Image: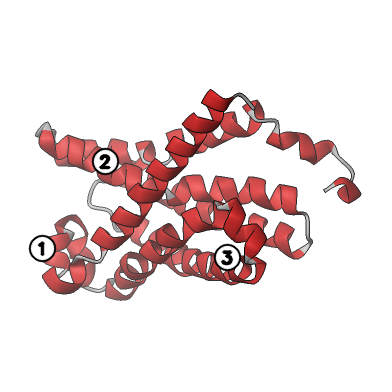
């Protein structure tokens, strides 16, 4: 691979890593501040829907923080047991927060279009992660990596959602309209970007190979 491409890929990876860790840490601001102050647009869930709310906002940052480490080649090769345990924790965090997020999607105050966007995100997040776990168990590691990259692109929606929300607030856009768009915008481009990457990088070539070749 050309050195400039490798450099760009490293820069993108470390930028995504720093962003993911920062957002994961900032997400716990609700602990000292309370949901009403830290996440006022979710505070309506406290009345009758508090368990899914806390399951999502309390556990999803764990998945976000663990995600970058799963793609560090040296860690994966040098500490395979740690990689497996972190992977299990990542998948478990997504199971809890994904199911909770699916429940929360139908209580969005932005309307049915926003609810559909967040519900689709939750379903695909759970499905891609589950597929990645299945391939790991089957020791189909090339396919495992493909599906975990897809899972990671959806996990990263936590970062892109906050970027778009911050932009909308800075530009003083109508929140209900902006939030409806962001419900889709936070994850669809991520999913498309990873599919383009998988095709351009040739990663999908493994699908047509015999199992023994992996």
- For label 1, the residue is 37
Q: Nearer the viewer, mark 2 or mark 3?
A: 3
Identify the residue shown where x is 11% and y is 36%: 170
Q: Nearer the viewer, mark 1 or mark 3?
A: 3
Q: Count of labels shown? A: 3
Q: Helix, strand or loop at disc 3?
A: helix
Identify the residue shown where x is 46% and y is 65%: 99
The residues tagged by marks 1 and 3 sit, at their Cα atoms, a distance apart of 33 Å
In terms of sequence position, does the residue under pointer 1 or pointer 3 come before the other? 1
Please tell me how crowded label 2 is: few (under 14), some (14-19), or many (20+) other residues with Cα within 10 Å: few
Residue 127 x/y as whole percent: 59, 55
Q: Helix, strand or loop at disc 1?
A: helix
The residues tagged by marks 2 and 3 sit, at their Cα atoms, a distance apart of 26 Å
C-beta proximity under 8 Å, tags 2 and 3: no
Residue 81 x/y as whole percent: 64, 71
Q: Helix, strand or loop at disc 2?
A: helix
- For label 3, the residue is 87
Q: Is residue 137 left or right of residue 107?
A: right
Identify the residue shown where x is 43% and y is 36%: 11
Q: Is residue 120 left or right of residue 53?
A: right
Quarter-wise, where is residue 48 in the image?
A: bottom left
5 is higher (above) or lower (below) than 127: above
- For label 2, the residue is 163
Identify the residue shown where x is 63% and y is 34%: 198
70 and 130: which is toward the camera: 70
192 is higher (above) or lower (below) than 90: above
């Amino acid at each position: 691979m050309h050195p400039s491409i490798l450099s760009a890929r490293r820069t993108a990876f470390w930028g995504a890593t720093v962003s993911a860790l920062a957002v994961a840490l900032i997400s716990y601001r609700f602990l000292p501040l309370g949901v009403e102050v830290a996440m006022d647009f979710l505070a309506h869930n406290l009345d009758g829907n508090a368990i899914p709310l806390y399951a999502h906002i309390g556990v999803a940052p764990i998945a976000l923080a663990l995600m970058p480490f799963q793609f560090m080649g040296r860690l994966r090769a040098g500490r395979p047991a740690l990689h497996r345990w972190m992977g299990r924790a990542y998948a478990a965090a997504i199971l809890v927060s994904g199911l909770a997020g699916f429940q929360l999607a139908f209580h969005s105050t932005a309307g049915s279009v926003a609810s559909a966007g967040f519900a689709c995100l939750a379903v695909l997040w759970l499905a891609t992660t589950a597929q990645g776990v299945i391939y790991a168990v089957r020791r189909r590691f090339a396919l495992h990596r493909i599906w975990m990259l897809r899972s990671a692109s959806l996990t990263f929606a936590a970062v892109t959602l906050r970027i778009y929300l911050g932009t909308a607030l800075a530009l003083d856009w109508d929140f209900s309209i902006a939030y409806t768009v962001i419900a889709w915008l936070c994850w669809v481009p991520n999913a498309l970007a990873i599919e383009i990457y998988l095709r351009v990088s040739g990663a999908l070539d493994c699908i047509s190979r015999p199992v023994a070749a992996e």
